[in-house]
Every structure is written in structure tokens, then in C-alpha cells.
Amino acid sequence: MEEDKKTQESFDDIEKYSGEYSEEKFWEKLKKLGKKAGIKVVYAALLLYYVVKSPLTPSKERYKILGALGYLILPMDLIPDFLPVAGYTDDLAALTWAIYTVAKCITPEIKAQAAAKTHEWFGAFDESVLEGLL
């Protein structure tokens, strides 16, 4: 219960992590975490990456996305990434929160781009595992 409260407080001001984001750090982190973090984390990060790159995304939404991606990039966050299994659960929660916050900006084209890149890295997989993210 206390951990849920800390997590929510962290997401309430997630924009503060936007300074941690850079495109170079994003790709470096995504390549490092790859299969260790899992398909859902990678797909969620890619969805947000493509949304932030879209010229149709309002500035207000970009800060939320950059905050979530900055949080992903940080190795020492609420649950440190080096912890087996649990290390990326808070990252996925931050990414999922951002996805729901900016869902209106996620177009079918963005979903297709994120899915294509995820397939490029993971090969063939059942896309139904991604359904809970949108």
C-alpha cells in the first residue's frame, strides 16, 4: 500500500524527469534493456517515442511523455533496474500511465511503427500480449 502511494506520487510530477531524456540516451537504454525488460516495456517505450516525435502531439503532452521516457532512462528509480524481474515494473507503470494520459495522440500509424520496431527486435510474437497497454 505504501509502495503504491510512492509510485502514484512519483507519477503525479513525472514531468520532472523530462531532463533525463535525450534521443541518444533513449536508444541506448532501449538497446540495453531489450529482452531483459520484455516486449511490453519496449513496445510501451516505442509508442511514446513515436508519439513525442509526431508533429500532431501538443506540447503539454510531450512533457508527460518525456518525463516517462526520462524515468525509464534513469537506472536508479523507485525500483532499481538491476533487480531481477521487479526492476522494470515501475518503468512499465510510468510508461503505461503516460500512454493512458496521451492516448488520444496515439494514431494507428504510431501503433504500427511501434509494433514493427518491436517485431524487428523480438521477431514474431503474439500481439495480444500488448493489448493491456491501450
Image (spheres, helix red, strand yellow):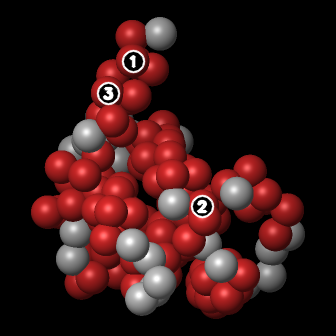
Q: CA distance from mark 1 to mark 3?
A: 6 Å
For the residue labelled by badge 3, is the local secondary structure a helix, a strand or a loop?
A: helix
Rendered view: 116 above or below 36: below
Q: State left or right for residue 59 relative to residue 99.
A: left
Residue 118: where, in percent of width, then height? 63, 80
Name the residue at 61% across, 83% down: 110
The residue that disc 1 covers is 5
- Residue 115, can we see it? no
Residue shown at 43% from the left, 40% from the top: 90
Residue drawn at point x = 33 percent, y = 22 percent = 6
Query: Can you say whether 93 is above or below 22 in the image?
Result: above
Query: Dot 1 surroundings within 10 Å: few (below 14), some, or many (20 or more)?
Result: few
The disc placed on residue 9 is 3
Query: Where does label 2 land, which residue?
Result: 103
Query: Residue flagged by tag 3: what amino acid is it?
Result: Glu
Q: Quadrant of the C terminus?
A: bottom right
Real-space Cα separation, disc 2 to disc 3, in angstroms: 21 Å
x, y percentage for residue 69?
34, 63
Residue situated in front as seen by the camera: 90 or 35: 90
Can residue 59 be seen from the camera position used here? yes
Q: Is residue 101 above or below residue 115?
A: above
- CA gap between label 2 and label 1 equals 24 Å
Whichever of callouts 2 and 1 sits on the residue coming sooner in the sequence is: 1
Query: Which class describes the residues within 10 Å of circle 3: few (<14), some (14-19), or many (20+)?
Result: few
Question: Relative to 128, is 111 above or below?
Answer: below
